[in-house]
Image: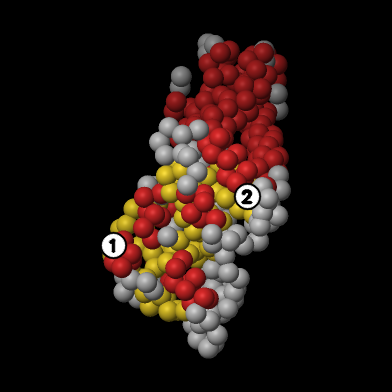
């Protein structure tokens, strides 16, 4: 293969080559990004823990469950322990997107989520401090908070009766080992909230939003789910127990068929870029008709003539694809921090990168073969008669 000729042809019309290169790079980047988003939407369901169940009201997720349910759920055979999980929804200064705060049972939370690790501070200090809290690493960095910082929250759902803010002290910062769990959430003692309401220091609904159930090793979740639902079939509040995968699916379904929409957008982008590159290579083939005639007259094989054009197309698209994939991978951490609140599972996996490579090289091959076949069939006499 005369690689110097391939390079010379690409440089002969450098502006066209550059624009085609950038188009392919951006298209592959967009396709990889969309694939990462689709993966993020589905991974929360596919990678959910199999030993965690969620118990919510059968009426609505926004209906509180009685506090007395915890001990009854914990007594079901196969349940290792049951714990509170209450959304707080407070406001922190000028951070309107910081609404992910949950009251939890400090002695059971971290063992239930082995995918979380403490990277600053001490979880034991959090357990000892009634007004302590644990915060995700991304949120702590975003708000400039460190261990020991005060985190005042004004309660919307649970306002304090004297109008003051809820004062929390940051005792520990966590990091997630998996992309499906965000690092933007704050966790605090549920008992601090419960006692404040019972003592009249705060207003709000008594009860708990959902119960988190941790199963003992080897326990079949289906039977446990059925027993918990049957336990409260006659009230006072009927419940619906689901696996973590199904619980996560409820939130994904609220967005509609977003994965399907993104796949359609991706297909349209792919369709457009294939035809754009094909048009570029057809132009290149027409422009060098006389050159092809001279090459064949000098003894170059038809396969070599075709191979030069195919090599140009594959080299151009392949290099653009590699750069596009590298760009998306480089920005992966930034994208995860931006989309963590609604899309904690965003990730540019090896599968996504391989798909990007396949699209890039496949586009180059397809766009080069079709005009290359025309040059292959071109007779030297006809080519030499073509206008320059």
Expressed as whole percent of the image width and height from the top left, the position of residue 145 reads: 37, 72
Judge the density around disc 1: few (<14), some (14-19), many (≥20) Cα neighbours within 10 Å.
Answer: few
Give the distance between the C-alpha atoms of the residues marked 2 and 1, in whole angstroms: 35 Å
Expressed as whole percent of the image width and height from the top left, the position of residue 316 reads: 52, 35
Query: Residue at 65% across / 61% down in the picture?
Result: 63
Residue 299 drawn above or below residue 131:
above
Q: Nearer the viewer, mark 2 or mark 1?
A: 2
Q: Is residue 77 left or right of residue 378?
A: left
Query: Residue at 46% across / 39% down in the picture?
Result: 78
- Please tell me in which quadrant of the rendered image residue 214 appears: top left
Q: Are marks 2 and 1 in contact (CB under 8 Å)?
A: no
Residue 38 drawn above or below residue 281:
below
Expressed as whole percent of the image width and height from the top left, the position of residue 254 reads: 68, 52
- Which residue is the extreme one toward the bottom? 162
Helix, strand or loop under label 1: helix
Q: Quadrant of the C terminus?
A: top right
User: Sequence order check: which comes first, mark 2 or mark 1?
Assistant: 1
Which is more toward the observer, 179 or 207?
Answer: 207
Which is more toward the observer, 360 or 176?
Answer: 176
- Please tell me in which quadrant of the rendered image residue 27 appears: top right
Q: Can residue 151 be spotted in the picture?
A: yes
Expressed as whole percent of the image width and height from the top left, the position of residue 7 reads: 47, 32
Judge the density around disc 2: few (<14), some (14-19), many (≥20) Cα neighbours within 10 Å.
Answer: some
Q: Is residue 128 left or right of residue 362?
A: left
Q: Is residue 91 left or right of residue 232?
A: left
Which is more toward the observer, 176 or 381?
Answer: 176
Query: Residue at 62% across / 62% down in the picture?
Result: 64
Residue located beneath label 2 in the image: 232
Helix, strand or loop under label 2: loop
Query: Residue at 52% across / 51% down in the picture?
Result: 72
Residue located beneath label 1 in the image: 124
- Please tell me in which quadrant of the rendered image residue 376 appears: top right
């Amino acid at each position: 293969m005369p690689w110097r000729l391939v390079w010379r042809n690409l440089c002969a019309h450098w502006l066209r080559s550059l624009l085609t290169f950038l188009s392919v790079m951006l298209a592959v980047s967009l396709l990889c990004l969309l694939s990462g988003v689709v993966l993020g939407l589905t991974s929360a369901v596919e990678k959910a823990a199999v030993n965690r169940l969620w118990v919510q009201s059968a009426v609505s997720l926004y209906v509180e469950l009685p506090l007395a349910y915890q001990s009854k759920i914990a007594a079901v055979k196969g349940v290792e322990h049951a714990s509170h999980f209450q959304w707080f929804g407070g406001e922190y200064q000028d951070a309107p997107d910081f609404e992910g705060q949950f009251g939890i049972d400090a002695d059971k939370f971290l063992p239930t989520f082995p995918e979380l690790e403490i990277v600053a501070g001490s979880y034991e200090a959090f357990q000892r401090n009634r007004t302590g809290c644990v915060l995700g690493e991304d949120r702590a960095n975003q708000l400039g908070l460190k261990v020991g910082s005060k985190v005042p929250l004004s309660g919307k759902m649970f306002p304090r009766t004297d109008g003051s803010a809820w004062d929390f002290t940051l005792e520990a910062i966590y990091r997630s080992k998996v992309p499906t769990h965000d690092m933007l959430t704050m966790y605090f003692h549920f008992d601090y909230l419960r006692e404040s309401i019972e003592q009249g220091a705060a207003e709000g609904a008594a009860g708990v939003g959902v119960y988190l159930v941790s199963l003992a090793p080897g326990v079949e979740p289906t039977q446990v789910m059925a027993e918990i639902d049957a336990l409260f079939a006659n009230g006072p509040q009927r419940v619906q127990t689901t696996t973590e995968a199904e619980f996560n699916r409820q939130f994904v379904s609220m967005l509609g068929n977003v994965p399907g929409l993104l796949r359609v957008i991706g297909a349209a982008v792919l369709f457009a870029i294939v035809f754009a590159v094909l048009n570029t290579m057809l132009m290149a083939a027409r422009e060098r008709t006389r050159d092809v005639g001279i090459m064949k007259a000098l003894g170059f094989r038809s396969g070599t003539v075709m191979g030069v054009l195919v090599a140009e197309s594959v080299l151009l698209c392949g290099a653009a694809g590699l750069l596009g994939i590298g760009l998306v991978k480089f920005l992966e951490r930034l994208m995860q921090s931006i989309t963590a609140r609604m899309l904690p599972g965003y990730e540019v996996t090896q599968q996504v990168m391989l798909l990007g490579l396949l699209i890039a090289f496949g586009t180059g091959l397809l766009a080069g073969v079709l005009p290359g076949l025309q040059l292959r069939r071109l007779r030297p006499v006809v080519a030499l008669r073509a206008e320059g």
